[in-house]
Amino acid sequence: MSVFSRIFKNKKYGDNSHLNNQLNSNKIIDNFDNKNQNTNNIHLEDVKMNDSKINPEDKNYFKKNRSLAKKVIAIANQKGGVGKSTTAVNLTSYLGYFGYKTLIIDIDPQSNSTSGLGISTDSDKSSIYNVIIGGELLANVTIKTDFLNLDAIPSSIQLAGAEVELVASMKREYKLKEAVDKIKNDYDYIIIDCPPALGLLTINALSAATEVIIPIQCEYYALEGLGQLLHTIKLVKENLNSELEIAGALMTMYDPRIKLAGQVISEVKKYFPEKVYSTIIPRNVRLSEAPSYGKPILSYDPECKGAQAYKSFTKEVIENGTKRTR
């Protein structure tokens, strides 16, 4: 059943029985009971495959018995439609696949990451809004998804008015950080999907994060406003969060038939010397279809070009994190 059908049935949070958290038949994770396993310690030897072996190139990226620095990564760009939610959903699902306990926080009022994981956007249920405005604990609004090692904190339409409500609050830029700090050590990665704006919600995400990933569409308009985003990140680093670093820029929606796309990539590399991810996410029909079924591409079509690109990108994220802990 697609998300379109579920919207009109007003499903409740966590009603994800229609989803399948396993890969398709040629890459199935077999005999794995999430409820009875300690998901903090999922390693390569715990992942059993049917009919096919794990790709040798993937083996080095599974979580190993070593301590890792906890990562809180904001996915940010004030321009809409550049692939923030697509990146957040697919990055977190692959991190979970590789054995890392992962949490996705959706602070975008449009709730795309929430629906993209098959979670109902029922405004009557607790969401990140209750944390930022009501002071509720993140642990109380966390939902276990149907995907390996992946928890989620949903968004809701109530967030649309949150910035107005935050104006009079004390320490308004730190509401999310204060909540995240209490559960940060419970996860290897916390990924925050930001709204397409540079308002207080995005500022909260940048204040809570250790790193920011900037998805950039391979089109001319995507370059507009990039300087403003970099300036905002610089101000947050100087005044609110000295730990914040730009992890890198991710080029998305690449179409090799369009000459301008290559020129945009060249321009972005001037903005971010040595900080553009090697992986480029292509335009891909299957990537566009997956959210309508409430699934990340890993579960919807793990063999398509979009899935392979996001797997490669996730490996870069893991590799970069590992380098910084050596």
Image (cartoon, rainbow, N blue to C red):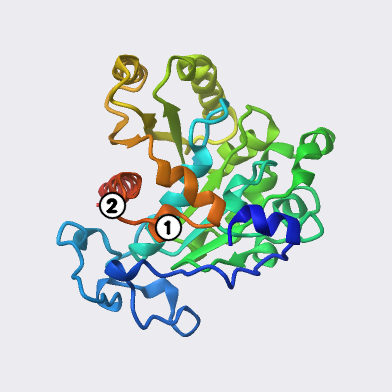
Q: Is residue 147 in view?
A: yes
Q: Seen in the image, is 25 located left or right of residue 237?
A: left
Residue 87 locus on image (x, y percent): 45, 43
Q: Is residue 71 in view?
A: no
Q: Seen in the image, is 21 located left or right of residue 193?
A: left
Which mark, residue 322? Answer: 2
In the rendered structure, which amino acid carries the disc numbered 2? Thr
Q: Residues within 10 Å of mark 2 (few under 14, many from 20)?
A: some
Residue placed at 68% from the left, 37% from the top? 173
- Which image quarter: residue 220? top left
Q: Seen in the image, is 227 located left or right of residue 136?
A: left
Residue 174 locus on image (x, y percent): 67, 42
Q: Secondary structure at mark 1?
A: helix
Q: Residues within 10 Å of mark 1 (few under 14, many from 20)?
A: many
Which residue in the structure is indicated by mark 1?
300
Which mark, residue 52? Answer: none
In the rendered structure, which amino acid carries the disc numbered 1? Tyr
Residue placed at 20% from the left, 71% from the top? 52
Query: Are dots 1 and 2 in contact, CB under 8 Å?
Result: no
Q: Earlier in the sequence, mark 1 or mark 2?
A: 1
Per the model, the C-alpha gap separating discs 1 and 2 is: 28 Å
- Which image quarter: residue 117? bottom right
Query: Nearer the observer, disc 1 or disc 2?
Result: 1
Residue placed at 35% from the left, 19% from the top? 268
For the residue pair 128 and 223, the one nearer the viewer reads as 223
Residue 125 locus on image (x, y percent): 77, 61
Residue placed at 30% from the left, 45% from the top? 305
